[in-house]
Image: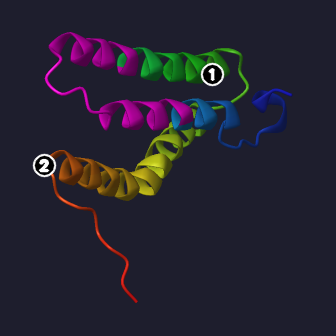
Amino acid sequence: VSTQSTGMSFYSGHTLSAFYAATVCCLLLHYTDLSNRQRLFSLRFLVQCLLLSAATWVALTRLQDHFHHVIDIAVAAVVGTITPIFLLISPLNQFREEQLGRKCGEVGPLLVK
Protein backbone atom coordinates (compact mmCIF):
# COMPACT_ATOMS: atom_id res chain seq x y z
CA VAL A 1 0.00 0.00 0.00
CA SER A 2 1.43 3.34 -1.01
CA THR A 3 1.32 6.40 1.22
CA GLN A 4 0.22 8.42 -1.77
CA SER A 5 -3.01 6.47 -2.10
CA THR A 6 -4.10 6.78 1.53
CA GLY A 7 -2.89 10.24 2.47
CA MET A 8 -2.05 8.95 5.96
CA SER A 9 1.27 7.78 7.30
CA PHE A 10 2.95 6.06 10.21
CA TYR A 11 6.60 5.82 11.09
CA SER A 12 8.59 3.04 9.47
CA GLY A 13 8.97 -0.14 11.49
CA HIS A 14 11.78 -1.29 9.24
CA THR A 15 13.72 1.93 9.82
CA LEU A 16 13.04 1.87 13.54
CA SER A 17 14.25 -1.73 13.82
CA ALA A 18 17.34 -1.06 11.73
CA PHE A 19 18.40 1.97 13.77
CA TYR A 20 17.55 0.20 17.04
CA ALA A 21 19.72 -2.81 16.17
CA ALA A 22 22.54 -0.63 14.84
CA THR A 23 22.51 1.54 17.97
CA VAL A 24 22.52 -1.45 20.31
CA CYS A 25 25.46 -3.01 18.45
CA CYS A 26 27.33 0.30 18.38
CA LEU A 27 26.82 0.79 22.12
CA LEU A 28 27.99 -2.74 22.90
CA LEU A 29 31.04 -2.27 20.71
CA HIS A 30 31.74 1.09 22.34
CA TYR A 31 31.67 -0.41 25.83
CA THR A 32 33.86 -3.36 24.85
CA ASP A 33 37.26 -3.15 26.50
CA LEU A 34 39.99 -3.18 23.87
CA SER A 35 42.74 -2.15 26.31
CA ASN A 36 45.15 -0.15 24.17
CA ARG A 37 44.78 -2.10 20.95
CA GLN A 38 44.80 0.68 18.38
CA ARG A 39 44.19 -1.61 15.43
CA LEU A 40 41.08 -3.11 17.00
CA PHE A 41 39.89 0.36 17.95
CA SER A 42 39.99 1.37 14.29
CA LEU A 43 38.18 -1.81 13.28
CA ARG A 44 35.51 -1.16 15.91
CA PHE A 45 34.96 2.35 14.53
CA LEU A 46 34.68 0.96 11.00
CA VAL A 47 32.09 -1.64 12.08
CA GLN A 48 30.07 1.05 13.87
CA CYS A 49 30.07 3.19 10.72
CA LEU A 50 28.99 0.22 8.61
CA LEU A 51 26.13 -0.58 10.99
CA LEU A 52 24.81 2.97 10.91
CA SER A 53 25.26 3.09 7.12
CA ALA A 54 23.20 -0.07 6.76
CA ALA A 55 20.43 1.42 8.92
CA THR A 56 20.49 4.58 6.79
CA TRP A 57 20.29 2.45 3.65
CA VAL A 58 17.18 0.70 5.02
CA ALA A 59 15.61 4.10 5.71
CA LEU A 60 16.40 5.40 2.24
CA THR A 61 15.00 2.31 0.52
CA ARG A 62 11.72 2.74 2.42
CA LEU A 63 11.59 6.30 1.16
CA GLN A 64 12.60 5.40 -2.38
CA ASP A 65 9.91 2.72 -2.63
CA HIS A 66 7.28 5.30 -1.56
CA PHE A 67 6.22 3.31 1.50
CA HIS A 68 6.73 6.25 3.88
CA HIS A 69 7.06 10.02 3.95
CA VAL A 70 10.30 11.76 4.94
CA ILE A 71 8.93 12.64 8.38
CA ASP A 72 8.00 8.98 8.98
CA ILE A 73 11.58 7.94 8.27
CA ALA A 74 13.04 10.73 10.41
CA VAL A 75 10.81 9.92 13.40
CA ALA A 76 11.60 6.22 13.14
CA ALA A 77 15.35 6.90 12.97
CA VAL A 78 15.22 9.20 16.01
CA VAL A 79 13.08 6.80 18.07
CA GLY A 80 15.20 3.82 17.01
CA THR A 81 18.36 5.62 18.07
CA ILE A 82 17.22 7.26 21.32
CA THR A 83 15.34 4.29 22.81
CA PRO A 84 18.32 1.93 23.20
CA ILE A 85 20.47 4.80 24.48
CA PHE A 86 18.01 5.43 27.31
CA LEU A 87 17.64 1.72 28.00
CA LEU A 88 21.30 0.69 27.87
CA ILE A 89 23.52 3.57 28.99
CA SER A 90 22.97 3.11 32.72
CA PRO A 91 23.44 -0.70 32.77
CA LEU A 92 26.48 -0.46 30.49
CA ASN A 93 28.08 2.23 32.65
CA GLN A 94 27.49 0.09 35.72
CA PHE A 95 28.98 -2.94 33.97
CA ARG A 96 32.05 -0.92 32.93
CA GLU A 97 32.57 0.34 36.50
CA GLU A 98 32.36 -3.21 37.84
CA GLN A 99 34.87 -4.43 35.25
CA LEU A 100 37.28 -1.58 36.00
CA GLY A 101 36.96 -2.27 39.73
CA ARG A 102 37.85 -5.93 39.24
CA LYS A 103 40.88 -5.05 37.11
CA CYS A 104 42.21 -2.80 39.86
CA GLY A 105 41.92 -5.61 42.40
CA GLU A 106 38.87 -4.25 44.15
CA VAL A 107 36.13 -6.54 45.33
CA GLY A 108 32.68 -5.93 43.87
CA PRO A 109 29.84 -4.72 46.08
CA LEU A 110 28.60 -7.17 48.67
CA LEU A 111 24.91 -7.68 49.29
CA VAL A 112 24.26 -7.28 53.01
CA LYS A 113 20.83 -7.54 54.53
Marks 1, 2: nearer the viewer: 2
Instruction: Kindly identify the amino acid type of the residue bearing the numbered disc 1.
Output: Leu
Label disc, if present, on residue 104 of the rendered structure: 2
**Residue sitting at 54 percent across and 16 percent down?**
57
36 displayed left or right of 65: left
113 displayed left or right of 13: left
Q: Which residue is mark 1?
A: 63
**Residue sitting at 83 percent across and 37 percent down?**
6
Q: Residues within 10 Å of mark 1 (few under 14, many from 20)?
A: some
Q: Is residue 70 above or below residue 58?
A: below
Instruction: Residue lying at the far bottom in this picture: please name it.
Output: 113
Query: Could you tell me residue 108's position as x and y percent?
Result: 27, 63
Query: Could you tell me residue 103's position as x and y percent?
Result: 19, 45
* Mark closest to the chain's N terminus, 1 or 2: 1
Query: Could you tell me residue 69's position as x and y percent?
Result: 63, 32
Q: Is residue 46 above or below residue 100?
A: above
Q: Is residue 19 above or below residue 87?
A: above
Q: Main secondary structure of the magenta part?
A: helix
SS at circle 2: loop
Q: Is residue 77 above or below residue 79?
A: above
Asked if the magenta segment contains residue 44, the reply would be yes
SS at circle 1: helix
Instruction: Kindly identify the amino acid type of the residue bearing the numbered disc 2.
Output: Cys
Q: Which residues are magenta?
A: 21-48
